[in-house]
Image: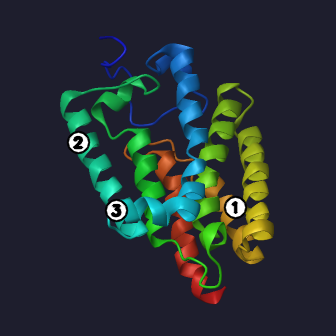
Amino acid sequence: MKLFFGSGKLSTDVIPLDIDHAKHSVGGMNGHIFRRFTHVIMCLIPILYYTKGDQLSDFFSMEPNQFVTYCLLVLILLEIVRLYFGIIIVGQREYEAKQVSALAWGAFAVCLALIISPESKNFEGMESGLYAAPLIWGLTFVDPIMGEIKRSKRGIKAAIFGGLVTSYVIWLSSTYFLGTPFIASIILAPMTVLGELPTVRWIDDNATMILLPLTILLLIEPFL
């Protein structure tokens, strides 16, 4: 049962910036690696949504955004059940037994990005995800890179630098391949990194890394 139920040993409200999360993950280092893997594999979500979303949602007689909304509702229900029983699975951290998990926060933010991000009216396929795709890729790649730099005790400045380089590569690549406005990429890339910095328990950076740039995007999109 040790692999599935945690004790919530970390009880403070603020998480140290350079904490070694592997020591507090169910499954130890293997659990930590699995957690990172699930982060990275989420990069496929916008690709599947914008290339196969219509086919998948048609199978359930829904529009793509309706399908995502239903998925979000199911995820919320599962998280409520998980919290009620205090369950944590391999890769999750001990304190997540008593609070909304990083996985749930990330899934919530990814769903919101797909539902409310502005889409291109001139293109179909991946080009229509000119905003949602880099928003989600920022979470899937920037967060693990910054997390591992901090875990290696190289300092927050090194983590921010590594995060900025990764984030700008993602956003500027989206400008080149998806048509994301250049000015939007310049503004939103550092917002992704800024969203990774909060160290409080009541919201996970898996959410803020998407919700912060998404909020800024909605404010500046009429001017782009």
Disc 3 from disc 1: Cα separation:
26 Å
Disc 3 from disc 2: Cα separation:
17 Å
Asked if 165 appears above or below 211 in the picture, the reply is above
Badge 2 amino acid: Ile
The mark nearer the N terminus, 3 or 2, is 3
Badge 3 amino acid: Thr
Q: Which residue is mark 2?
A: 80
Image coords of residue 166 (percent x, y): 75, 49
Label drawn at residue 69: 3
Label drawn at residue 40: none
The mark nearer the N terminus, 3 or 1, is 3
Q: Residue at x 70, y 61 (%)?
A: 189
Asked if 176 appears above or below 147 in the picture, the reply is below
Disc 2 from disc 1: Cα separation:
33 Å
Label drawn at residue 189: 1
Mark 2 residue element: helix
Mark 3 residue element: helix
Q: Nearer the viewer, mark 3 or mark 1?
A: 3
Seen in the image, is 195 located left or right of residue 202?
A: right
Circle 3 Cα neighbour tier, 10 Å, few/some/many (<14 / 14–19 / ≥20): some
Image coords of residue 5 (percent x, y): 30, 19
Badge 1 amino acid: Ala
The image quarter in which residue 186 lies: bottom right
In the rendered structure, are the residues bearing label 2 and label 1 in contact, judged by CB atoms less than 8 Å apart?
no
Seen in the image, is 218 located left or right of residue 185?
A: left
Image coords of residue 95 (percent x, y): 37, 28
The image quarter in which residue 219 lies: bottom right
Q: Residue at x 36, y 19 (%)?
A: 9
